[in-house]
Image (tube, rainbow, N blue to C red):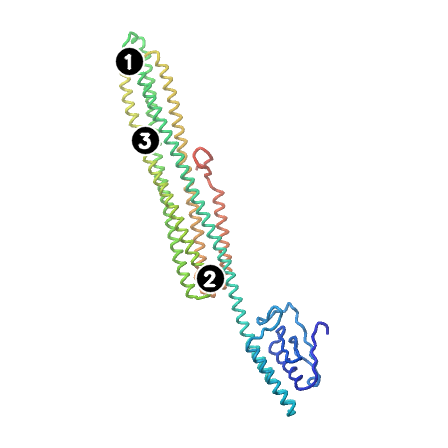
Amino acid sequence: MPGSRRFCCATGPGQRFYATAANLIWLARSESETVSIAPRTHKIDSFPAEPIKNKRFPTLCRFTFLKRKQADLQPPDCNNDGQFIVNQKLFYGSLAGILLFSVMTTVSLLAQLPDWLLLLLSTTPALIVIILLVASRSRDKQSAEAERKKEAIARMLGNYMATSNGAFDVVSEQFSSLRRELNQAKDILHSATEKLAGSFTGLDNETEDQRQRLQVLVEELYNVARGNQYKEQTEGINRFSTQSQEIVTNYISTLSEMKNNSSAIVDNFSEMTGQVNSVVSLLNDVNDITSQTDLLALNAAIEAARAGDAGRGFAVVADEVRNLSRRTNQFSDQIRDLILQTQSTMERVSVNIQEMAEADMSNALEAQDQVGNMWEEMRALNKGATTQAETINELSDSIRQHVNTGILSLQFEDIAVQLVDHIAQRSEQIEAFINGLIALHFEQSDFEQQIEHFQTRLSDLEKIINNGKQGFAQLDQNKAVAQQNVESGSVDLF
């Protein structure tokens, strides 16, 4: 028949041995692909797909062996070509069977034993071969199953390591974003404080210039009062006194408002200090989490060491988790140092603003007393009073501009509050992300359950990473402050 192999043998004791051995081997390994047993010139090329049937046995043997398709499942003790791998025991057993067969054939030729006795004796080597084949097949199946399980565990551990590295890359990226936002807040505070200090410095200079001009004006009025024009300038003196009083009153009122605004600034700095303390507290919580992570990684390494070779991969994972925990602790310490520096800077700025406000107010009160004394002396007003008054008005406009600049600089409080809130939200996102990783990574289960549910845990880890990335991306899109100083950008005020 097409696609088949045929084996023909003549009658005789040796031929009957091969036929009997072929049938018995088929019974023991009917699903095998190929085996080669080639004593002398007789060869069985393959095991049949069905038992050998020949009505002419034992007179004339004609066997048809159906060739298996290449798509059939290969047994664990076959190589890539389908050839059965004969181990040392099988080899020596087969050799013993062949030697026994040769001895029995010689004896049968000499003693002409009956066929049934010769058949019984010739079957014994075949039975030995079958027993060795069955034992080898069972052992090789167990070895192959263990090897496949080991490879599956290695692949899953590799995937888990790669996914875990991706998760901690996300954490590292978010800490970088947190550090950038803190630097942005620091730059905004520095810019606003610098402009506010410049505004108060300009205000002090303009006030001093105004005082000097008023002094010159008073001296001129005094000189005029000593002359013959006293009576003619009485009305002008009264008018100038009224205007000067109004100017000084407005100036005192402006300084009083600035003092109130400075007090409000100090209060806002106090609130910002409290918020920064909250951020420091959150970073302390992050340090606690990293410490717990380090401890859990150590426990995992101990459990992996107890598991022996099977837990070696988990020991590597535990070491990597402990290293990442230490790096996270270092990042938290760096962030805490930056926040503490920012807090110290804000406290110094608050003290400086308060001192400037108190100093300006004391100078204003002193100037008011001096003006009161000048009013008693300004009895002689000359024609230059109008010119000096215009100069004073110009100085007032300059002071107003400095005040407006200071008010504009005060917007940094809103910007800083929004940045700190955004930093707090990002810290909460990072904390939730790390807690999810820890809860998944250190879930308690025995070794067999870990193998069975490893793929599920890997899928959950990927889901946590994807959700974390989406949350961080949304947080970046909803960022309220994009500017680096108080002069550019826009701010969402609430």
Specify the amino acid type for callout 3. Met
Look at mark 1 in the image and give the residue it sits on: 222
Quadrant of residue 225 in the image?
A: top left
Specify the amino acid type for callout 1. Tyr
Q: Is residue 239 above or below residue 145?
A: above
Residue 327, x across and y down, in percent:
41, 51
| Label 3 close to label 2 by CB (< 8 Å) | no
Q: Earlier in the sequence, mark 3 or mark 2?
A: 2
C-alpha separation, residue under disc 3 versus residue under disc 1: 34 Å
Specify the amino acid type for callout 2. Gly
* Label 2 crowd (10 A; few <14 / some 14-19 / many >=20): some
Q: Is residue 229 above or below residue 16?
A: above
Residue 161, x across and y down, in percent:
48, 57
Please tell me whether mark 2 sits on a helix, a strand or a loop: helix
Q: Is residue 74 left or right of residue 489?
A: right
Name the one closer to the observer, 75 or 42: 42
Q: Which mark is residue 356?
A: 3
Looking at the rendered image, the disc whose residue lies closer to the viewer, 3 or 2, is 2
Please tell me whether mark 1 sits on a helix, a strand or a loop: helix
Please tell me whether mark 3 sits on a helix, a strand or a loop: helix
Q: Which mark is residue 313?
A: 2
